[in-house]
Amino acid sequence: MYTSPTDELLVDFTDHILTVTLNRPDRLNAISGTMLDGLSKVLQEANIDPEVRVVVFTGAGRGFCSGLDLKDQMEGGNNLSGGRRGYRLFDLHNSPPIVINRMDKPMICALNGAAAGYGMDMALGCDIRIASENAKLGAVFAKRGVLPESGGCWYLPRLLGWAKAAEVAFLGDVLDAQRSLELGLVNRVVPHDQLMDETMKWARQIANNAPLSVQSTKRMMRLGQEETFEAAVDHIYLQLLPLFQSDDFKEGLSAFAERREPAFKGR
């Protein structure tokens, strides 16, 4: 059903769970232009595929993602420093950070190692982050003369509050797994060899829930960040009405009454 668009991006689909693995371990999974295109296409397809209920995002080898491969970007004509081309607008409409932010399907990031720059921003865009004890978040933008350009400036204050976000962004430290957990940037830290088992345990539990309910909840949580309370309540009610008409709602009630586990179909 799902095939890897490139050897640098691996996909596996099992039991309603789509696992996407960045696969350039020799470069700590630095993102090439080919990976950018492939990742966006895979995620966009998954978001409209009713069979996909959860997306797991991880990296091969000892790193999650070291950021954009700047050498690849420059050789491909995307000179980020400007050069002769000077300032120009980038078409970010279908870039991975935008696609990740628009996803209604829940996303779990299995942080297997270091995530820096673009890689850290993509990890922050996922709904849940489960970290190996070897994981690190390289919030070193200020030490490189740049800023969290691919979502970090938006996510950090919302995840941490202003003061803690300022601490992370302005100090420019590398945060180990335990510090990331203390700050609330990851949900759980586990021994490295248990990372994927724990991640898939969470993914299976989510996938066993009513998918339309989970996706509607995520959509309303995302949109609610920009709405007043009253507007959010009104929009949530409009989302609730079609759920009342779904087969899964009836199945949920029946399973509760019969004291059994529900078998949701996503319709």
Image (cartoon, rainbow, N blue to C red):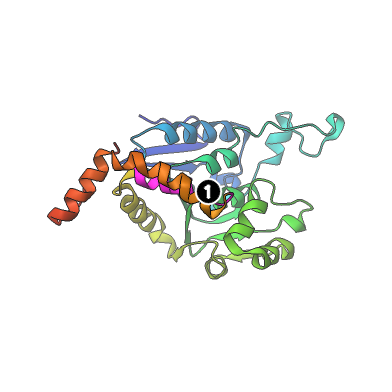
Say which quarter of the image contains residue 74.
top right
- Asked if 80 appears above or below 28 in the picture, the reply is above
Residue at image position (66%, 41%) is 69
Give the SS element for disc 1: helix
Image quarter hosting the C terminus: top left
Q: Residue at x 41, y 42 (%)?
A: 239
Asked if 207 appears above or below 94 in the picture, the reply is below
Residue 117 coordinates in the image, percent (x, y): 66, 50
Quick check: can you spot residue 12? yes
Of residues 160 and 83, the one nearer the viewer is: 160
User: Which residue sits at x=57%, y=69%?
Assistant: 179
Question: What residue lies at 80% left-to-right and 39% top-to-bottom?
Answer: 81
Residue range corresponding to the magenta coloring: 212-226
Q: Is residue 157 magenta?
A: no
Residue type, mark 1 in image? Ala
| Coordinates of residue 168 in the picture (x, y in percent) | 67, 64
Query: Which residue, given by chain and number where applicable, does mark 1 sit on?
Result: 231
Determine if the magenta segment contains residue 223.
Answer: yes
Q: Quadrant of the N terminus?
A: top left
Q: Is residue 216 left or right of residue 116?
A: left
Spot occupied by residue 171 in the image (x, y as percentages of width and height): 73, 65
Dominant SS type (magenta): helix
Position of residue 163 measured from the top left corner of the image (x, y, whole percent): 68, 67
For the view shown, which residue lies furthest in the left direction?
258
